[in-house]
Amino acid sequence: MLCCLHCNKQFRNNKEYEKHISICIFYLYNNKYKNKLDNELIKDILYMINIFDLHNKNIEYKVYKERLLNNLHNECIIISSFKIIGHDSYAEQKKIEYLYNYINNSNKETYNYIDIVNIISELNHVSNNDLLNLINAYKISYKNCNS
């Protein structure tokens, strides 16, 4: 039995394992960048990357404050609906509220890719480089998943 040392999933054969490591963000990040972020921290950061859809954006990406706030508000509604079905989403909701308040209280009207990276980095106490490396690993995983 083969095991991914980065996410602990097990596989019956080499073909399944090879496919997995081509899309396992934990493997791609830790293997390529050799920076061992905790898997829970990686999950938290990936959640934020998904909220802002950074894995589908390029460095020239710009977005208006109003759209960001609307997206965060919608995410809060989705998270609140999880409470109804019994999923504990308190930590996610607090992060969304923090992001919403941070952006809402800012004087900026337009945010670019690096602005969003800075916000996520600050919230998770990781360097911009680590975050950009994780986004790149996510992009590789996303591309390999869809090919």
Image (spheres, rainbow, N blue to C red):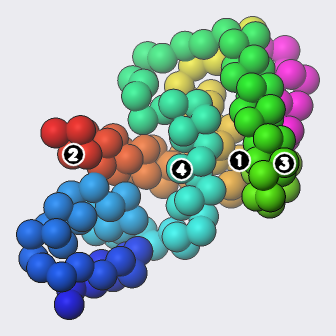
Label 4: which residue?
46
Q: Residues within 10 Å of mark 1 (few under 14, many from 20)?
A: few
Q: Residue at x 61, y 35 (%)?
A: 51
- Residue 117: x percent and y percent? 58, 37
What distance separates the C-alpha of mark 4 from that of mark 1?
Answer: 15 Å
Label 3: which residue?
84
What is the span of residues highlighted in magenta in the rendered image? 95-108
Identify which amino acid the numbered label 4 is placed on: Leu
Q: Are marks 2 and 4 in contact (CB under 8 Å)?
A: no
What distance separates the C-alpha of mark 1 from that of mark 2?
Answer: 29 Å
Q: Is residue 51 above or below residue 93?
A: above
In which image quadrant can residue 78 be found? top right
In this view of the protein, which residue sits in the foreground, 116 or 3?
Answer: 3
Residue 107 part of the magenta-drawn span = yes
Q: Are marks 2 and 3 in contact (CB under 8 Å)?
A: no
- Total label count? 4
Q: Are marks 1 and 3 in contact (CB under 8 Å)?
A: no
Identify which amino acid the numbered label 2 is placed on: Asn
Label 2: which residue?
144
Q: Looking at the image, is mark 1 or mark 2 earlier in the sequence?
A: 1
What distance separates the C-alpha of mark 1 from that of mark 3?
Answer: 31 Å
Residue 113 seen in the figure: yes
Q: Is residue 11 above or below residue 97?
A: below
In this view of the protein, which residue sits in the foreground, 117 or 7?
Answer: 7
Q: Residue at x 18, y 82 (%)?
A: 12
Horizontal side, residue 32 vs residue 127: left or right? left
The overriding secondary structure of the stretch rendered in magenta is helix
